């Protein structure tokens, strides 16, 4: 993977983009997370038995979750965004700032972190422990004491949290910069290429969708960045999974059994992204896409969150079912952070900011 130029982040110019799409990406991602959370770990046969042939289509309190309850997927997405916004405000290294934000999240999950640096860490709702990823916890435990986080994990905990990279980057920024930053953020905890390269693809796709690309065009941009920034061997698994996603989406919505057979259960980075991309490609609308993404035997909250990020970036807030928004946990936090994105981008645009410094 291409080595990051730390100066690139400071040299990206920010301007105003459609705030509705920013909100849509974050809110639909959280809603997809909340929809899929109660059926994560359930087999499709169990989901079908409990909810019918279309599977789960609305919030439920199954498995002890409250209606609309988010999981670590949305929690970590919000902490990613907080770190990126802090880097933008201060003109500092986004990887360092997000690493610090992740340690704040680790503290909310019971981790021993002596210094709390952000605001989100003080919101008690984010201290809920909703089956956090073991790789994220173990990696952050090492980082908290100054040790290197060494693993070969390709779990989906890296990709499911990086959509904010696209939200904070200027729409005209080079795809390689967005790809590389997202992959580096995922690699803070997940060191297998299939754990961090899908994060780069997702960020490039979200950025393209914010710019009114179709899902097909966004995927082309993501695959191009993957080929340009990763070697043939390390990208092979992710590339193959995404080509399988396209094949699975041909001919309409694939049944859950076929999704699992061809794309896996979403437990790994490349599988989670592939399921979400497949759902986004074949869906008639955002509601249908998120529904397809969560109804399978696997990591339903992560695949729902990623599909929501993609389709929310494309369609905006109005496409999200009102009943999903009305009972969505921490909606106010999501809205607050989306407003901060708009403020930071707008302030920099008005000043013609093109580098690090106060207000950039």
Image (cartoon, rainbow, N blue to C red):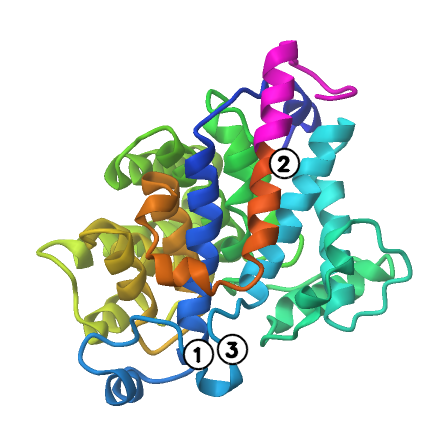
In what element is the residue under mark 2?
helix
* Residue nearer the viewer, 338 or 249: 338
Side of 273 where 76 appears, left or right: right
Instruction: Work out whether residue 188 can be spotted.
Output: yes
Q: Quadrant of residue 279?
A: bottom left
Tell me the magenta residue range: 342-360
Q: Position of residue 100 (x, y in %)?
A: 77, 50
Residue in view at x 47 percent, y 20 percent? 172
Side of 179 where 311 appears, left or right: left
Q: Rate crowding at label 2 as few (under 14), some (14 to 19) or many (20 or more) other CA atoms within 10 Å.
A: some
Q: CA distance from mark 1 to mark 2?
A: 31 Å
Q: Which residue is mark 2?
A: 340
Side of 129 where 307 appears, left or right: left
Q: Quadrant of residue 295?
A: bottom left
Residue in view at x 42 percent, y 48 percent? 235
Q: In which quadrant will I find the C terminus?
A: top right
Q: Which residue is mark 1?
A: 38
Q: Is residue 11 above or below residue 132?
A: above
C-beta proximity under 8 Å, tags 1 and 2 = no
Q: Is residue 140 above or below residue 46?
A: above
Q: CA distance from mark 3 to mark 2?
A: 28 Å
C-beta proximity under 8 Å, tags 3 and 1 = no
* Residue nearer the viewer, 74 or 148: 74
Residue in view at x 43 percent, y 58 percent? 325
Q: Which residue is mark 3?
A: 66
Q: Position of residue 134 (x, y in %)?
A: 63, 73
In what element is the residue under mark 1?
helix
Q: Quadrant of residue 1?
A: top right
Q: Rate crowding at label 3 as few (under 14), some (14 to 19) or many (20 or more) other CA atoms within 10 Å.
A: some
């Amino acid at each position: 993977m291409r080595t990051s130029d730390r100066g690139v982040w400071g040299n990206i110019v920010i301007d105003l983009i459609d705030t509705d799409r920013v909100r849509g990406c974050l809110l639909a991602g959280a809603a997809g997370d909340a929809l899929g959370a109660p059926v994560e770990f359930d087999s499709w046969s169990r989901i079908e038995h409990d909810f019918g042939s279309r599977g789960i289509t609305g919030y439920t309190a199954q498995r002890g979750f409250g209606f609309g309850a988010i999981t670590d997927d949305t929690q970590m997405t919000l902490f990613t965004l907080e770190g990126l916004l802090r880097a933008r405000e201060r003109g500092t290294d986004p990887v360092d700032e997000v690493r610090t934000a992740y340690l704040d999240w680790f503290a909310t999950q019971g981790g021993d972190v002596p210094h709390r640096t952000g605001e989100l860490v003080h919101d008690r709702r984010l201290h809920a422990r909703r089956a956090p990823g073991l790789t994220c916890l173990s990696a952050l435990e090492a980082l908290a004491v100054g040790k290197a986080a060494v693993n070969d994990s390709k779990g989906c905990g890296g990709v499911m949290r990086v959509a904010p990279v696209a939200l904070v980057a200027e729409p005209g920024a080079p795809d390689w910069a967005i790809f590389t930053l997202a992959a580096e953020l995922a690699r803070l905890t997940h060191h297998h290429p299939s754990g961090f390269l899908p994060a780069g693809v997702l960020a490039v796709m979200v950025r393209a969708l914010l710019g009114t690309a179709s899902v097909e065009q966004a995927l082309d941009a993501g695959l191009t960045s993957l080929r340009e920034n990763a070697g043939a061997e390390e990208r092979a698994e992710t590339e193959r999974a995404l080509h399988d996603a396209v094949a699975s989406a041909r001919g309409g919505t694939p049944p859950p059994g076929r999704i699992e057979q061809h794309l896996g259960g979403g437990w790994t980075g490349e599988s989670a992204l592939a399921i979400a991309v497949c759902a986004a490609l074949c869906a008639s609308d955002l509601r249908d896409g998120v529904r397809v993404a969560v109804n399978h035997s696997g990591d339903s909250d992560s695949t729902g969150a990623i599909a929501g990020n993609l389709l929310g970036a494309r369609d905006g807030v109005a496409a999200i079912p009102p009943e999903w928004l009305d009972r969505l946990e921490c909606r106010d936090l999501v809205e607050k952070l989306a407003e901060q994105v708009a403020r930071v981008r707008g302030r920099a645009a008005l000043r013609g900011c093109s580098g690090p410094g106060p207000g950039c």
